[in-house]
Image (spheres, rainbow, N blue to C red):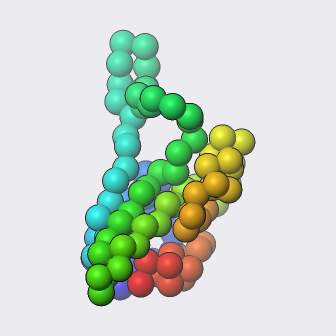
Amino acid sequence: MTTPLHLRQSEAQFQEAVIEYAQAQGWMVHAERPARSDKGWRTPVQGDAGFPDLCLGRLRDGKREVRFLELKTEIGKLTESQASWLMCLPNAYLFRPSDWPQIEEVLA
């Protein structure tokens, strides 16, 4: 399954494409979405900010696998807290739409 490369797609569109591909490859997906409150958009978090956008897990041939993906548009900036999480988590990746071939490789 190959997704057409859309370098101008929004982060939400990119995330949707990655989730669809991951699920087709047998990954379970966890993602948090912000919700609108009377104070604007909020994503409730307890603990440290910057956790990756997607946490993926699957059991394959009796082996547990996990991947953490931070997704950005082509021009999106990584925050310091996001960089810190990526540095300390195993199997953590930063992907942009132009990285689609690597996404397919990592999630195969």
Q: Residue furthest front?
A: 62
Q: Nearer the viewer, residue 38 or 29?
A: 29
- Left or right of residue 98: residue 103: left
Q: Tell me which residue sits at (47%, 81%) in the image.
A: 104
Q: Quadrant of the N terminus?
A: bottom left
Q: Is residue 60 above or below residue 15?
A: below
The answer to whether one can see residue 33 in this image is yes
Q: Nearer the viewer, residue 78 or 87?
A: 87
Q: Tell me which residue sits at (68%, 50%) in the image.
A: 83
Q: Position of residue 5 (x, y in %)?
A: 51, 75
Q: Tell me which residue sits at (61%, 49%) in the image.
A: 85
Q: Is residue 57 above or below residue 2?
A: above
Q: Nearer the viewer, residue 91 or 106?
A: 91
Q: Position of residue 41 (x, y in %)?
A: 43, 26
- Left or right of residue 39: residue 51: right
Label total for image:
0
Q: Position of residue 24 (x, y in %)?
A: 28, 76
The answer to whether one can see residue 21 in this image is no
Q: Is residue 10 above or below residue 42?
A: below
Residue 43 appears in which quarter of the rendering? top left
Q: Residue furthest top?
A: 38
Q: Quadrant of the C terminus?
A: bottom left
Q: Position of residue 21 (x, y in %)?
A: 35, 73
Q: Tell me which residue sits at (57%, 41%) in the image.
A: 50
Residue 18 appears in which quarter of the rendering? bottom left
- Left or right of residue 6: residue 24: left
Q: Residue furthest right?
A: 80
